[in-house]
Image: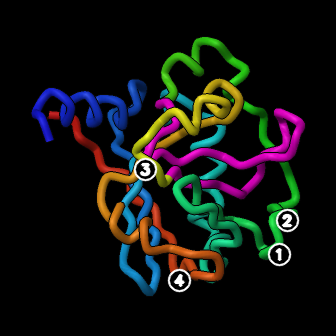
Amino acid sequence: MQLSLFYSLLNAAISSTNNQLSIVTLKTDKGNIIIELYPECAPKTVANFVKLVESGFYDGLSFHRYVKDFVIQGGDPDGTGTGGPGWTIPGEFKNATLREKMPAHEKGVIAMARKPSPDSAGSQFYICLNEDTSGYAHLNGSYTTFGRVVEGIDVVDQLREGDIMNEVTHNSEDIRN
C-alpha cells in the first residue's frame, strides 16, 4: 500500500473531535475481519453500530445474504433480512456535508442496509465484495457508508450465507501524540 494512501485511510478513521481510532473485529470460523469505523462520516450510524457491538447484539448472528461479486450482508437477528434491533436511525447519506466525507462503495467498504425508506436502517450492514466499482454506482449517495475492512478481506471473500459472526468486539485507541 502506498504510504500516502495509508495516511489517508488512517486520517479518515480518526475522529476529529476525540482523536480516537475506532476498530471493530468480526470473529468468524473462517477468520477475523478488522474494520475501521469513520465517525466523522456518519456519527449516528457509528454510534449505533458500536452500541450494538458492545451490547453483544451481533454475537452469534449469521450473514443472511450473499450476492456473488456484490455484497455479504448480516446483522438481522431473525436471519431473514427483515429484522432489526427494534429501532431505526436516520440515513446520514441525506446530509450533504457528511455524504461528501463517506467512502464510495468499493471492495471492503461497510454500509448500513435499509428498507426503501431512507431512515429505516437499524442493525443490518453489508460489506462490498467487488473491486469493480461500477456495480455500486447506484448505491453511492443512497446508503450510509461508515467504515472499511482493513484486515481480513480474504476472510470476507470466503463468507457465504449462513456463516456466523461468533463474536464482534469494539476497541477505541487514543492515537494522540
Lateral position of residue 17 relative to residue 136, left or right: left
Q: What stretch is highlighted in magenta?
A: 103-128
Few, some or many residues within 10 Å of mark 4 (<14, 14–19, 20+): some
Residue 83 disc label: 2
User: Which residue is located at x 33 percent, y 67 percent?
Assistant: 154
| Magenta run includes residue 147 | no
Label 2 crowd (10 A; few <14 / some 14-19 / many >=20): some
Residue 13 horizontal/vertical position (percent): 36, 37
* Mark-to-mark CA distance, 2 and 3: 24 Å
**What type is the residue that disc 4 sits on?**
Asn
- Upstream in the sequence, badge 4 or badge 3? 3
Residue 155 in the image: x percent, y percent?
38, 71
Inspect the image, locate mark 3, and give the three-letter code of the amino acid beneath it.
Gly
- In the image, 59: left or right of 33? right
Q: Quadrant of the C terminus?
A: top left
Write down the residue under mark 4.
166
* On screen, residue 40 above or below 37: above
Q: Distance between the residues labelled 2 and 4?
A: 19 Å
* Count of marks, rendered view: 4
**Residue 168 placement (x, y as % from top left):** 51, 71
Task: Return the residue nearer the eye: 135 or 9.
Answer: 135
Residue for point 83% across, 75% down: 78
The answer to whether marks 1 and 2 mark residues whose Cβ atoms lie closer than 8 Å is yes
Looking at numbered disc 2 in the image, what kind of residue is underneath it?
Gly
Residue at the image point whose x is 71% and y is 29% from the top: 142
Q: Nearer the viewer, mark 2 or mark 3?
A: 3
